[in-house]
Image: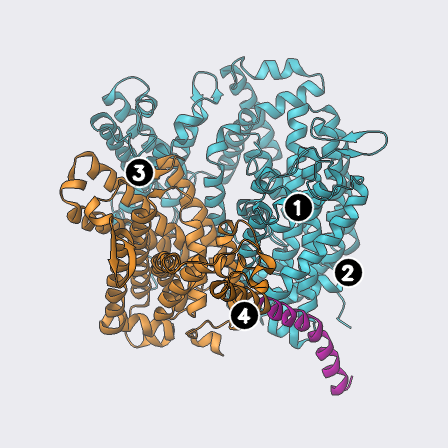
Chain colours: A orange, B cyan
Amino acid sequence: MSTHAISTKSAKRLVSVDRFLTFIRVFLVTMIFIGLLAFIWQQFDADNPFAQWRNPGARGLTGDQFKGLLISGLSQGSMYGLIALGYSMVYGVLGFINFAHGEVFMIGAMTGFVASDKFQANGMWESNFLLCLVLIIVMATFFSTFTAVMMERVAYRPLRNSPRLIPLITSIGVSFFIQNFVLGLFGPSTKSYPRLPEWLSKQRSILTFEIAGTRLLVLAVAAASMAGLWYIVERTKTGKAMRAVAEDKEIASLMGIDVNRTIVTTFAVGGAMAGVGGILWGLMFRSVTHMTGFLPGVKAFTAAVVGGIGNLGGAMAGGISLGSAESLAPLLILEPLGVPGVSQLKDAVAFTVLVLVLLFKPSGLFGERLSSEERA
Amino acid sequence: MSTMIAPMPSSALDQDWSKVLRWGLICGGVLIALCLVGMPVELDRREIIERYLSLGYVSVLLIPIVLGRIAATQVVLEGFESRKQGLFDLVTGLLVGLLGGGCLSLLMVALDSWNLRDPLVNWSPKLFRFLTYENGMGFGAGAWIATCAVLSMVGAASHVVPAIVRRVSGTVVLSLLSLAVLEGAVEDLSEGFRLDWLADLIYAKKGGLTLTSTIVVGAVIGLVAVFTSGRVKAVTNRYRDLDGVERQKASMILFAVVAVLCIVLPMFLGKIMNELLANVGLFLLLALGLNIVVGLAGLLDLGYVAFFAVGGYTTAVLTSPNSPFFAPELHFGIALIFVVIFATIVGLVIGAPVIRMRGDYLAIVTLGFGEIIRLLFMSDWLGPYFGGAQGITNVPGVDLGFATVKGTDPRSVFYLVLFFCVIAIYVSWRLQASRLGRAWMAIREDEQVAEAMGINTVSAKLMAFVVGAVLAAFSGAVLVAKVGSVFPTSFMILISIIILVVVIVGGMGNIAGVMVGSFVLIGVLGGPKQPGLLQEFQNFKLLIYGMLLVFMMLKRPEGLVPSARRSRELHQDEFLQDAWLKGDKPGADDEDADTVDVGARGGEEE
């Protein structure tokens, strides 16, 4: 067979799938564009025929509504970001998706519930809230870290050198196991966190933004944890070791770095972040079940991919963009297109973002850091 | 790591204390976790031996045996001499059991002194009564420590006693256990064959074996085991050593036996058992489809349930008079054509964007698609077409002219499912050794190399998606015809994962493995909503599924019934090492294994 024949043949077979993918890309972008355009139009002139085209009742959003959505997107996104850090770090170091990371988050939220419930029962929750907050964060981080480390020790370490999909399948099993173990321990009922004290949760007005105190707290704690993580990874010796192991395990071990220990530390730090995220989730939504970890987990993974997996700043940025997209896109894009009941499609939007990112820029917004074997 | 001389203990008390402590604490931890999850108390209702032993106690008692055995396992590195096992290992087992029992006693003390019922739902007086045999603290603690120690020693002793003793006692215990546990099935079967008197003889009125029947049946099984010892293995070995035409002949005979059993058996079974078989069949159909996608082509599709949903909804819309938007009320057979068409389209649409992604991204994105499809079916947006959360009800059964297949008659459903399963098995079997099947396996092993060898990886992967999708859609169609209605909540991601567990536990890439997997898991433990034979496990089956998945991945990634090629892939390092140790050229024995696997048809490509 001549070279020419081969190249035309392979070209032909690429064409059909690629043409279809191009079609999907163009279609999705057009829909987003039309939606946004219709939204902008209805903001300026609600009676405009284009704005009325798909959604006759359209009235647009007021400035306050928009700000409210943005804030809720940001605070939710910062939680995704906190969980995404764990995905990103483990991916950077071991090169596999730790599907059970969402469960680590759930363990944090659950621990927070158990502790805060007890605190409320003996009255400490009202009388000394800040101490309680610190205590539940410490406890949640402890249990989440413990879970993550145990996970690594029992399930992932023996699989260090196995084919790529094996640890992923294992992590699905781990996730399933933890979910149902927690179900067995605490029962299927939805657990609700105690109410936050009034002085904290009341609405505040900052820079014309009306923010509930809870969301402010969430943003502050998320920012503080992110700063702590940045310090650990970029300024300490442990962090240097982590980065070295992520770059190349073998060379790192030749340089005298204890690879096993570094990997455990990575899991521990990721677990701690997820634990903090879990507490924040509990404070904001005030309800936890054994399934709480699943959706935020998958979305956090999406956030990690959006930001470029293996890239820590990217994970946080990805989380925030995903959170905002999730809260804004239904009203900004889908509603003007005339889709009813858009709030039900929030989760679908998040998954669509994942597909979009992987279609357009698989390496994520900020580029991913891959270990050497993948670059080759 | 260590010197070339294996460390020899000087006396039975010269133990590796850190190891003993570790396994003892693991034993205790597992026991406590088990109690707090509530398994023993819940399973206590099921009698194994009337008045003496319940399944709850069995579940607890198995732990020290297993862990004692593991703790006393001797790790022999290549090139080291193994030590003769004896008293030393018994002591190891004993100590592990003592520690485990001690932990359990601590739990008892804690149960007695604090009330943690608030967060821990199983922290109950019931658990305390279960643990103490209603005889008070001291008795309970002493009894558990002693029992755990003895059982753990028994576990350790399994390394010491001669192989025949171990095999026979293992067989006796396991068959007695399964006889008691499968009581429902056995009674149903014996009723069908008019052998009720036998079942009455074996089982007590309130469930469980009677003491005399335990002894008698145990003795019989023991004798049989002694006489057949080694024979079973010889037969399976002979089967394995067959090759080419003879092996095919043997497989055909085996297959024919299974087929006849499948056709004849349901006639003698009651409603519940038939229902169970129908469920097993539905999941087998799904698992066969996933086996093509995951097992053969190596594409980890976590949103597999989407195709199941497409099949279900297509059938419901086309056949039900209650379909909200478009209700042509077609016959099931005609609807089936559309099921195939839509499944193909959805397979292509989901497949195309993910086909170029790395394996792990593909998994998450397909998971996302699975959720998107469920959310869309549930949303108000598509609600006018698919009924939203209310679903579509009143789907008629399958009218075959001479009979109608619907949920009230599980036997007919089973035959319908069987029909589809036979198609699916035939298709998978033919595909496996075909050009396409070999292309799939090549992609699974190394995509780049496969591409370099001239395989059209894109179309091969898309084909895998489509074939898997169609099989899943068939299953969905039958499910809807069986249940008579369709709701978005029937298509949770959970189902994808359960099917994945079935495929992996059975053996990825092996039809027989997948069959065994669905019979064992779905039949015994049950599907996501469907109860299995062990209805008491209802609340714990997902826990067990998760554990099984992890366990299989760690210990036996090739599954219970492995496909030769797949297991070689997974243990490549060991194969190469063995070959190296033997001084062979690596790859010398690879070749003949290949021909066995692919059969006589394993020719060259092109």
Q: Amino acid at mark 3?
A: Gly
Q: Position of residue A308 (x, y in %)?
A: 43, 70
Q: Which of disc 4 and disc 2 is earlier in sequence?
A: 4
Give me the residue at 66% from left, 48% from top.
Answer: B310
Q: Position of residue B66 (x, y in %)?
A: 41, 39
Name the quarter where the N terminus of chain A is drawn.
Answer: bottom right
Q: Which of disc 3 and disc 2 is earlier in sequence?
A: 3
The residue to which callout 1 is attached is: B385
Q: Is residue B219 left or right of residue B473?
A: left
For residue B589, say whether it is visible.
no
Residue B600's label in the rendered image is 2
- Spatial CA distance of label 3 from label 4 is 45 Å
Give me the residue at 39% from left, 50% from top.
Answer: A103
Q: Amino acid at mark 2?
A: Ala
Q: Position of residue B316 (x, y in %)?
A: 70, 41
- Spatial CA distance of label 2 from label 4 is 29 Å
SS type, badge 3: helix
The residue to which callout 3 is attached is: B28
Residue B583's label in the rendered image is 4
Mark 3 or mark 1, which is nearer to you?
A: 1
Give me the residue at 15% from left, 48% from top.
Answer: A131
Q: Chain of mark 2?
A: B
SS type, badge 2: helix
Q: Check contact, mark 3 vs mark 1: CB within 8 A.
A: no
Q: Check contact, mark 2 vs mark 1: CB within 8 A.
A: no
For residue A268, say whether it is visible.
yes
